[in-house]
Amino acid sequence: MNQKEDLRYRLRRGFIGIQNIGCQALFRCIEICELPDKETWQPVLPASLDGFTYEGESQWHLENGILTARGKLGHAITKQAFEDGFELQVWAKTNGNGNGGVLCRWTESGRGFEVQVFNTPDSTNPTGSIYGVAPADKICSADEQWFLMQIFANGSRAMIRINGENVAETDQLQSPFQGHIAFQQHTPNGFIQFRNPRIKKWNESNPSN
């Protein structure tokens, strides 16, 4: 799978489906053996809201592994910093016209780069855009539905995938190349949710999952 560009970054897990196109079909002795996980993922969400520092006026809630934000513009910033050369996976969901994002390499002196969450077709920076650097070339997500965001970053390079589709790329990112991860809420009357964010080292010759 690593040799095929359209397969090499896809998740290596999912559902198993059985198809029937109208004829009789019989299945028996269907078995599966789970193999040991070869990946080393690190959870990004802390155990409680005390694991974040905050900026702005958003209201944050953490329950059952889901981080929810409402209210005015604000950020929840991990207290832990992360090294460069990573893949970050996170599921996100917004209500109608919800707006926010995920910021990587946040430091005391700068906000790093932002990956936008805004499912509006006429936006100049729709979901998956590297804000102000590389707009997403298509929209692969919708409000009120969970979608998968994959952020790959190494030095000046970054690639963004939404629901398994490449939507934005750049080789123009500036230092610093490490820092904290921040979750953003932007729309005053909207909300945004983040589920199961996790991070691991990105090996470009042997991509994830």
Image (cartoon, grey):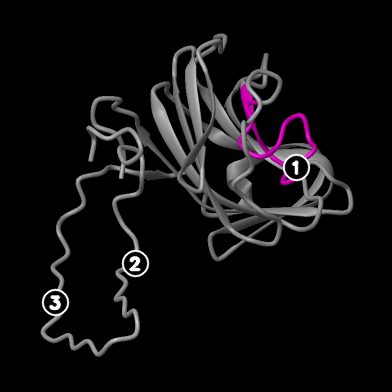
For label 1, the residue is 121
Q: Nearer the viewer, residue 79 or 74?
A: 74
Q: Is residue 45 visible?
A: no
Q: Amino acid at mark 1?
A: Pro
Residue 102 bears which disc, if any? none
**Residue 127, magenta (yes or no):** yes
Disc number lying in front (1 or 2):
1
Which residues are drawn in magenta? 113-130
Q: Amino acid at mark 3?
A: Glu
Q: Earlier in the sequence, mark 1 or mark 2?
A: 2
Task: Tell which residue pokes out farthest to the left in this image.
Answer: 29
Residue for point 75% across, 42% down: 121
Q: Earlier in the sequence, mark 2 or mark 3?
A: 2
Residue for point 71% across, 20% down: 132
Q: Amino acid at mark 2?
A: Phe
Q: Nearer the viewer, residue 190 or 144?
A: 144
For label 3, the residue is 31
Query: Residue 120: percent from the left, percent from the top?
Result: 77, 44
Residue for point 80% across, 56% down: 96
Query: Residue 85: percent from the left, percent from the top?
Result: 39, 23
For label 2, the residue is 15
Task: Tell which residue pokes out farthest to the front in this image.
Answer: 23
